[in-house]
Amino acid sequence: MRFRLTPRETSFYDMFSASADNIVTGSKLLMELLGADSASRVEIAERMRAAEHAGDDATHAIFHQLNSSFITPFDREDIYNLASSLDDIMDFMEEAVDLVVLYQIDELPKGVEQQIEVLARAAELTAEAMPSLRTMDNLTEYWIEVNRLENQADQIHRKLLAHLFNGKYDAMDVLKLKQIVDVLEEAADAFEHVANTVETIAVKES
């Protein structure tokens, strides 16, 4: 790491960590959704909405800090991109839960649990990685593994689409379920965007 002659604002690290921890909370709510009945799903959706609002607050706090800081720990554009991508993850997860409730889905297709398991693992890795932004140490394995998970998510998504279009589902159900699995895939993509941004930051800071 380059030697710094000027101090850097350190609260960004704490805010990124808080945002990532909130995503872990969201991924756990997704896991709860899998085995929940209709009434429980409504309650889970309310908790997910609260978590999403907390994520928005965390993102706005980062942007406010960014706009009021003369010195930042790394490039302003990278701070903005990282905060935005973390926020996107939470938005997609909340949207998926909301759609399940709004569409009154009785049973999610086989394979969705694999999508959610991938998201939960990516959430854990992301939360573990954020504190390492202070030193930029031991981050390579993080972005490699998240990229691997995203590739796995792509494969799961394609298999789910093939399953939905095999003729066993009503056309309206296909539209509803496809929207849900597509949003979960977008969440996986957003995790990769976070990992790619972290890699960019690490390369610049090396």
Image (spheres, rainbow, N blue to C red):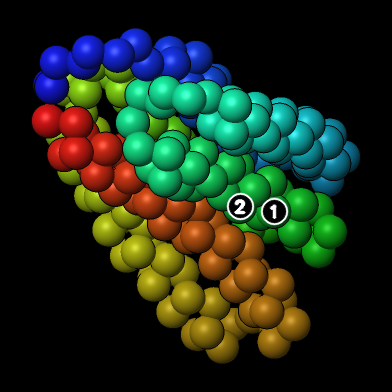
Q: Residue at x 64, y 30 (%)?
A: 64
Question: In the rendered view of the protein, which quadrant contains the C terminus?
Answer: top left
| Residue tagged 1 | 95
Q: What crowding class fits label 2: few (fewer than 14 Cα within 10 Å), some (14-19), or many (20 or more)?
A: many
Residue 132, visible in the rendered structure: yes
**Amino acid, disc 1:** Glu
Q: Residue 166's spot in the image, x, y percent?
A: 50, 85
Q: Nearer the viewer, residue 68 or 54?
A: 68
Residue placed under numbered mark 2 in the picture: 92
Estimate the x, y position of residue 16 in percent, counting from the top left: 48, 25
Q: Residue drawn at (34%, 11%), measured in percent from left and top?
A: 7
Secondary structure, mark 2, is helix
The answer to whether residue 172 is above or below residue 21 is below
- Residue 149: which numbered mark, if any? none
Q: Residues within 10 Å of mark 1 (few under 14, many from 20)?
A: many
The residue lying at 47 percent from left, 76 percent from top is 161
Q: Foreground: 135 or 188?
A: 135
Corner quadrant of residue 75: top left
Along the viewing direction, whichever of 85 and 21 lies nearer the viewer: 85
Taking the spot 75% from the left edge, 35% from the top edge, the residue there is: 53
Query: How far, Cα to Cα, is label 2 from label 1?
Result: 5 Å
Is the residue under label 1 in contact with that under label 2 (CB below 8 Å)? yes
In the displayed structure, does residue 65 sit left or right of residue 191? right
The local secondary structure at tag 1 comes to: helix
Asked if residue 115 shows in the view, the reply is no
Quick one: 189 or 46, which is closer to the camera?
A: 189
Q: Quadrant of residue 142?
A: top left
For residue 136, side relative to residue 6 (left or right): left
On screen, residue 122 versus residue 91, left or right, reads: left
Is 96 located above or below residue 133 in the figure? below
Q: Amino acid at mark 2?
A: Phe
Task: From the top left corner, tell me how far across and down residue 125 is, in percent.
Answer: 34, 29
